[in-house]
Structure formats: structure tokens, C-alpha cells
Amino acid sequence: MLFSLAILLFISPTVTALTDLQVNCTGTDRLYNDTSCYVVVGTAKPHGAAKASCNHYLGYSGHLVHIRSAAVKAVVKQAMNNYIPAGTTTVWTGLQLKNSSAVTTDINNWGSYYRNGTSVTPTYLPWQSGQPSTAATNNRAYYGSAGDGIVNAAETGTYPYVCEYEEALKQPVTDLEKKCANLTSSFKTLFVNDICFVMHPETKYYSDAKVACNDISGYNGHLAHARTMGDLWVVNALVLVSPLTVARLGIEHTNTSSTDMTSGWYLTTPTNQSELATFLPWLPSTPLPVRHSLAVRPDYPNFVMNIYTTELYPFICQYEAMASSATTTGGGRAVSKFNHYSLGYFSNNYYWIKRSTVPLYLCINMCHTNNLCRGFSYSSGTSDCQLLAVNASSVPYSSQLTADNQYTTAVRELL
Ligand SMILES: *[C@@H]1O[C@H](CO)[C@@H](O)[C@H](O)[C@H]1NC(C)=O
Ligand SMILES: *[C@@H]1O[C@H](CO)[C@@H](O)[C@H](O)[C@H]1NC(C)=O
Ligand SMILES: *[C@@H]1O[C@H](CO)[C@@H](O)[C@H](O)[C@H]1NC(C)=O
Ligand SMILES: *[C@@H]1O[C@H](CO)[C@@H](O)[C@H](O)[C@H]1NC(C)=O
Ligand SMILES: *[C@@H]1O[C@H](CO)[C@@H](O)[C@H](O)[C@H]1NC(C)=O
Ligand SMILES: *[C@@H]1O[C@H](CO)[C@@H](O)[C@H](O)[C@H]1NC(C)=O
Ligand SMILES: *[C@@H]1O[C@H](CO)[C@@H](O)[C@H](O)[C@H]1NC(C)=O
Ligand SMILES: *[C@@H]1O[C@H](CO)[C@@H](O)[C@H](O)[C@H]1NC(C)=O
């Protein structure tokens, strides 16, 4: 008896231990129940913007709530009722119609989406009476606490939302995820599968956008590659918050004299060789002629279409953790040697692979890890770093250098 009591005392602290998520899931806008933390956000947003805003806890791949069961529905209702200021009676959920060509009334046609664009088919769909609407445009669903059930609505409807953070999805928080979340004051971002996707609302031609993915120092960025339907779902969520609802991807039709628009599309980066794109779910009636770059649109389900390289569009960048490593893997070289060439820089930006404002050591490292970098120009005054696509000391480039004693230009010796 004494013995078993001793064991009980010994194990009880473990039984009552709280998880990190549980510890942090406090406040009148949130509730922890059965291994998930639910956060009510009272600010009304369209569904895509709501998705990209589930960043209360890093490391948990936050997503819009999955109303899996009557118990979860009760918890969400409770969280909404607790929410201050009160008055939030409708919230977006993570439910989306998977397929626009099938009917809204078929449960198999709905998916509860995770942040990576993968969904689970719900077994529980508590429609309010008279729901679902059969309109194909009502392809998202919100929960209403008054009717205690779900209603399908168009993506553009603005509602408050509930984010869910699950213990089971916990991952270590990486430096990239923190930096990605830090960008959200100026951009919309989604951190998915160790990739930080960043929506740039400003518009650029393709050639300029291609070298403009420099948001996160220490990480090589490039225009987003949508390789799978999941990736396309992610960039689709971001394009929904862009001003033009069309955004550039890093995919181009490299042979601009070819009139065969269905083949010859490549995934490009400013650092690596291009790679043939094999996943191209064309918007009906596309590809169109003469348009040699690719874009994502908010069409439903998720499609790509081709656009002119010299028209102004917003663009989506992506950053990966691998690319910054200065080792022999990940496209970098074991050793790089840089020889000082001259004081000056190139004003012709076609010679730049990338331009950023970074300390000198990062500028050197960025060139070192970039397979296509042939040298750099660096200003000690302004920390302006221009990675060069050309050998600055060779003809005809050498004669085009603008003399400036603030800039040093170095040529990379390939070892
Ligand atoms: C939760 O709170 C603990 C301190 O109790 C803190 O160390 C931890 O970083 C927090 N975790 C998250 C995900 O915010
Ligand atoms: C979770 O929610 C259910 C349903 O409302 C409730 O019965 C249960 O007590 C809740 N659990 C916790 C730990 O709050
Ligand atoms: C969408 O639904 C239609 C009609 O049911 C079906 O033919 C098609 O295969 C579905 N597409 C996908 C991607 O599930
Ligand atoms: C997407 O995320 C969910 C939840 O984390 C996971 O179960 C699923 O395997 C992921 N899918 C892909 C393709 O990574
Ligand atoms: C994120 O931003 C905060 C506030 O500006 C800063 O203190 C922190 O160092 C930043 N974190 C990272 C990983 O950049
Ligand atoms: C580009 O396309 C043109 C027209 O089809 C063709 O003649 C040419 O060989 C192609 N160039 C390359 C490099 O494939
Ligand atoms: C460049 O290519 C290497 C090797 O294929 C790959 O590991 C790396 O992720 C690529 N970098 C970028 C930025 O795509
Ligand atoms: C750069 O060009 C100069 C002059 O043509 C040449 O001597 C040198 O080997 C080149 N360097 C590299 C790394 O290609």
C-alpha cells in the first residue's frame, strides 16, 4: 500500500505537466482542448488572407480550424463566446471544396485543408438548415454560432476566423521560420515545408522580378516554383491577397522564338541551372501565344496561365533553408577565391544576378554559394552588394565599369 502510494506521488507530476502550446494558449481569444489550441481572430478577412494569418505560434503549421466532430464544434463555439470584444458569431474554417466540377452537396468533395495544401476529407459536416448552397462559387465554409453549424460562402466574403495549432504538427522553430514570420508586417507570407513563400504586392517585369527575391538576408531566394498541387494551393492563397490577383512565378518559356507554348517551360532561379517544369495545370484556353512567363491566378481550383514578360505584375518569392549553407552541398563550392579587380561598379543591371544591402562577409558568402556568380561589386559606404553574372575583367565588360572609389569589384576564380 505504502509502496503503491509512493509510485503515485512519483508519477503525478508527469501526468499534470503542461505542453508548451498549452502553457501559451491563454487569453480570452483562445482555448486549449484535446491537444489543439484554437485562436479566435475578430478581424474579418477573405478566406485566403485568413489562411496566411495563422501565425500565433511558430512551429505548429497553424491552419484554419478543422471542425472534425461535435466536440470540436462545441469548443469553437465556446471560444467564440469567450472572445472579447464579443460579437463574433461567424468564423472561417479550413473547409474548401476540392473540385469545382463536382457538387457542393457531396461530402467527398470537401476537404479540411492543412497549411501545405493537403486536405483530409471530413467525416462530419454539420451544415446549418438549408445548407449547403449549390452555387459552385460558394467553395469555402464558415461556422456560425447562432445556427450552430456551417454555411458555404465565396472566398471573397470577409469573416473573422479561428486558427488551430495541433500538438501533433509540432516542429522545431527554425531561423527561417522566424524571419519569415517577421516579414508579415510588410508582406503576406506562408511558411510551409521549410519554405518561406512571400507575396510581393509591387509590380515588376519578369527580368526584374527574377532578381528581386532578396527579402531575407543569408538565404537565396527565387521566384516561387509550384511543383505540386499543394505548392499551387499555397501560392493561390497568397495571390488572393495581392492587388492584381495575378502573380508571377519563377517559371519561364526559355525559347522565346518558339511558338510551341505547351512545352519548353523551365523552373528558374538566379543561382542554379534551369529545370524542366513538369507540373503545369493550365487554366482552360491557355497557354496563350507570345506570353513567355508563368503566373498563378485565383481561379478555382488551382491553375497556372502564361503572361507577358514585359508587363507589370506582382510576384511571389520563395526562400529555402538549404540554399544558405556554405558547404559543398546545395549548389555551393568548397572553396572560392576572389581577386580584387578594380574600384567601380556596373550600372547595367543585366550584369547583376542579385542586388542586396548586406555586410561584406554575406556578400562574399552569397557569391560563394551561387553557382552562377562570377564576382561582386561592393560598396563599403552603403553596403550595396551586386552579385555579378559576368567576369568583370574580361572584354567587353571591363570597359563598361563605372569608376567609383566607394566600390570594390572582385572577380571570382573558379577552383
Ligand atoms: C511557450 O512558453 C514558453 C514559456 O513558458 C516559451 O519558452 C516558449 O517559447 C513558448 N512557445 C511558443 C510556441 O510560443
Ligand atoms: C473540451 O471540450 C469538451 C466539449 O466542450 C469539454 O467537455 C471538455 O471539458 C473540454 N476539455 C477541456 C480540457 O477543456
Ligand atoms: C472533379 O469532379 C469531376 C466530376 O465529378 C470529376 O470528373 C473529376 O475527375 C474531378 N477532378 C478531380 C481533380 O478530382
Ligand atoms: C501536409 O501536412 C499534413 C499535416 O501536417 C501532413 O499530414 C501531410 O502529410 C502533409 N502533406 C504533404 C504532401 O507534405
Ligand atoms: C524579428 O523582429 C524582431 C523585432 O524587430 C527582432 O527583435 C528579432 O530579432 C527578429 N527575429 C529574427 C529571427 O530576425
Ligand atoms: C527555339 O525555337 C525555334 C522555333 O521553333 C527553333 O528553330 C530553335 O531551334 C529553338 N531554339 C532552341 C535553342 O531550342
Ligand atoms: C540549386 O541546386 C542544388 C543542387 O541541385 C539544390 O540542392 C539547391 O536547392 C538549388 N538551389 C536553389 C536556390 O534552387
Ligand atoms: C576573367 O577574364 C580574364 C580576362 O579575359 C581571364 O584572364 C580570367 O581567367 C577570367 N576569370 C575567370 C574566373 O573566368
Image (cartoon, rainbow, N blue to C red):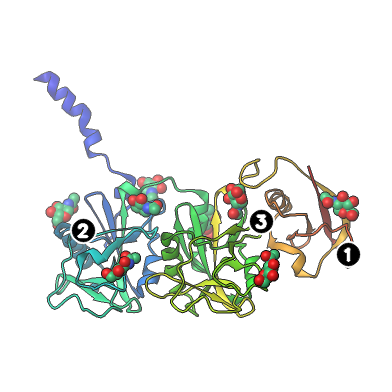
Q: Determine whether the beta carbon of the residue marked 3 sits less than 8 angstroms from the nearest atom of ligand 7.
A: yes
Q: Check disc 1 and report the residue beneath it.
A: 396
Disc 3 from disc 1: Cα separation: 23 Å
Q: Determine whether the beta carbon of the residue marked 1 sits less than 8 angstroms from the nearest atom of ligand 8.
A: no
Element at badge 3? loop
Disc 2 from disc 3: Cα separation: 44 Å
Disc 1 from disc 2: Cα separation: 65 Å
Q: Which mark is on residue 385? A: none
Q: Give the mark nearer the N terminus: 3 vs 1.
A: 3
Total count of labels:
3
- Residue at image position (86%, 63%) is 397
Q: Give the mark nearer the N terminus: 1 vs 2.
A: 2
Q: Position of residue 215 (x, y in %)?
A: 59, 62
Q: In front here: 381 or 210?
A: 210
Q: Residues within 10 Å of mark 2 (few under 14, many from 20)?
A: some
Q: In screen coordinates, is 126 left or right of 30?
A: left
Mark 2 residue type: Arg
Q: Check disc 2 and report the residue beneath it.
A: 68
- Looking at the image, can residue 75 be seen? yes
Q: What is the residue that sits farthest to the left in this orientation?
A: 1
Mark 3 residue type: Thr
Q: Residues within 10 Å of mark 3 (few under 14, many from 20)?
A: many
Q: Nearer the viewer, mark 1 or mark 2?
A: 1
- Residue at image position (67%, 49%) is 369
Q: Check disc 3 and report the residue beneath it.
A: 271
